[in-house]
Image: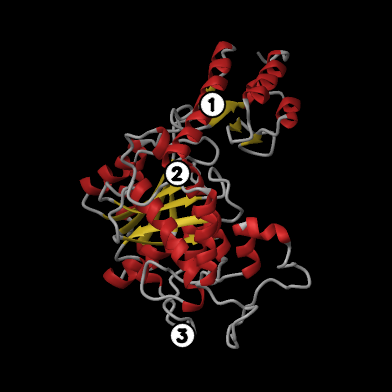
């Protein structure tokens, strides 16, 4: 690991205090031009004694703006301290977790994975328009039917077609025959440029697409494409549970990755991460943001620096070994549940390196699903699956009680 290490509580507090000192202090500094301030002091008491031991809460009160992309060009100097914290976070995620070369990536902490995915599609759409004079109706998004709804949302916002690729009902694997046929049909109908989204942990199943399925088809037919990895759920699980994974920037065909910190990392909502290779993010420069020091290269514009501090605190509290241990414990709990379901001959899907178990709905009575808060694939009578997510709060005792209730039903 080049950048990621475990720090003591005092080291973490000192680092965040230094970052806040490097920011403008609206309580003490003469700052007349910023359309911002600390949180309202009448409502939010910034003298509360507990704040001295709570760096994240201190940051929320200070209210820094992390507007911009701090890996590209200059940024607002008034908030340089928390901007540097964000750069430290991005270096850990891009280089140490996803194997990018140092200084070979751009990115930012977004308000969530949905925006990060839309940022990717927006960026690559503009890349094709700027470099190939492509028209919107010549560009298509390619993603599986299990893909997160942020992708059809991006298609709607950016006026692009989404080519929905079928998956096998039981294995959730992409149908490679239909993938090739759908892409060829689209190409014959005028689609020249493709934006492929490969999933690292789908929302419902935790399934992981093989990016090579997309790469093989596009390169076989010599088509223009960019490959984005949606690791919004799996990004803080899969690289640790499957340490042989090459779904990262070591694969030169992968151009960008989305990760959510408010899922597995347990950062506050909404905290996503967007990372891409150098040479792309400038395609979404908003030139009209002339009063912003530096360049606004993000969809959201202004965003809280406290989210960057929260992610930094989590990463540097655990360190890489501590995080690997946490993921390993969740993998063991997931396997425990799968063993119990196997013993009862209940059919389910589980990606081997993920902590989601999705059970066929025919085995789960509605009362059991409601009692344990299982999430259905569809909220109607056509539902075919319920999922269980083995998050940090789900312990073996909870799973044991669930299994006992399930064994008492006529479905088993």
Discs 2, 1 touching: Cβ within 8 Å: no
Q: Residues within 10 Å of mark 2 (few under 14, many from 20)?
A: some
Q: Within 10 angstroms of label 3, few (less than 14), some, or many (20 or more) residues?
A: few
Badge 3 marks a residue whose secondary structure is loop
Q: Is residue 318 above or below residue 300?
A: above
Residue drawn at 41 percent across, 68 percent down: 70
Indicate the position of residue 311 as horizontal and vertical percent values.
52, 53
Q: Earlier in the sequence, mark 3 or mark 2?
A: 3
Q: Secondary structure at mark 1?
A: helix
Asked if residue 313 lies left or right of residue 251, the reply is right
Instruction: Report crowding for label 1: few under 14, some 14 to 19, many 20 or more residues within 10 A (C-alpha).
Output: many
What residue is at 36 percent from the left and 70 percent from the top?
A: 72
Q: Nearer the viewer, mark 2 or mark 1?
A: 2
Position of 23 relative to 236 (above/below): below
Query: Mark 3 or mark 2: which is in front?
Result: 2
Disc 2 to disc 1, C-alpha distance: 23 Å
Quadrant of residue 214 within the rendered picture: top left
- Using the image as rendered, state which of residue 15 and residue 326 is in the foreground: 15
* Mark 3, residue position: 290
Q: Is residue 4 left or right of residue 339?
A: left
User: Mark 2 highlights which residue?
Assistant: 319
Q: Earlier in the sequence, mark 2 or mark 1?
A: 2
Along the line of sight, which residue is nearer the eye, 253 or 79?
Answer: 79
The answer to which of marks 1 and 3 sits earlier in the sequence is 3
View extreme (front): residue: 10
Q: Tell me the distance, in whole angstroms, between the alpha carbons under discs 1 and 3.
A: 51 Å
Instruction: Kindly identify which numbered label has been placed on residue 334.
Output: 1
């Amino acid at each position: 690991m080049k950048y990621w290490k475990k720090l003591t509580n005092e080291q973490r507090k000192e680092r965040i205090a230094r970052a806040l000192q490097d920011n403008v202090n609206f309580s003490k500094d003469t700052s007349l031009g910023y359309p911002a301030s600390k949180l309202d002091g009448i409502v939010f008491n910034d003298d509360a004694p507990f704040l001295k031991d709570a760096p994240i809460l201190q940051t929320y009160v200070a209210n820094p703006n992390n507007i911009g992309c701090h890996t590209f060009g200059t940024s607002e100097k008034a908030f340089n301290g928390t901007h540097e914290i964000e750069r430290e976070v991005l270096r850990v995620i891009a280089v140490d977790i996803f194997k990018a070369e140092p200084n070979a990536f751009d990115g930012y902490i977004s308000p969530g994975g949905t925006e990060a995915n839309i940022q990717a599609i927006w960026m690559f759409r503009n890349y094709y328009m700027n470099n190939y004079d492509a028209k919107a109706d010549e560009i298509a998004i390619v993603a599986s039917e299990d893909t997160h709804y942020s992708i059809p949302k991006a298609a709607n916002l950016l006026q692009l077609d989404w080519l929905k690729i079928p998956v096998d009902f039981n294995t959730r694997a992409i149908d490679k025959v239909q993938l090739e046929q759908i892409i060829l049909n689209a190409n014959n109908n005028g689609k020249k440029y493709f934006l492929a989204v490969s999933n690292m942990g789908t929302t419902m199943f935790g399934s992981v697409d093989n990016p090579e399925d997309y790469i093989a088809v596009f390169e076989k037919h010599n088509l223009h494409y960019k490959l984005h990895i949606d690791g919004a759920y799996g990004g803080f699980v899969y690289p640790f549970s499957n340490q042989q994974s090459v779904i990262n920037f070591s694969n030169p065909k992968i151009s960008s990755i989305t990760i959510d910190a408010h899922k597995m990392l347990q950062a506050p909502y909404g905290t996503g991460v967007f990372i891409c290779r150098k040479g792309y993010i400038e395609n979404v420069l908003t030139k009209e943001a002339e009063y912003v020091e530096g360049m606004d290269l993000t969809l959201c514009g202004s965003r809280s620096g406290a989210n960057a501090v929260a992610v930094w605190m989590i990463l540097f509290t655990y360190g890489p070994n501590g995080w690997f241990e946490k993921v390993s414990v969740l993998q063991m709990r997931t396997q425990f549940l799968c063993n119990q379901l196997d013993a009862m001959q209940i059919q389910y899907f589980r990606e081997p390196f993920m902590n989601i178990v999705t059970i066929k709905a025919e085995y789960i009575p509605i009362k059991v699903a409601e009692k344990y808060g299982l999430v259905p694939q569809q909220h109607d009578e056509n539902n075919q699956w319920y999922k269980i997510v083995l998050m940090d709060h789900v312990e073996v005792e909870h799973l044991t009680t669930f299994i006992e209730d399930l064994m008492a039903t006529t479905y088993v």
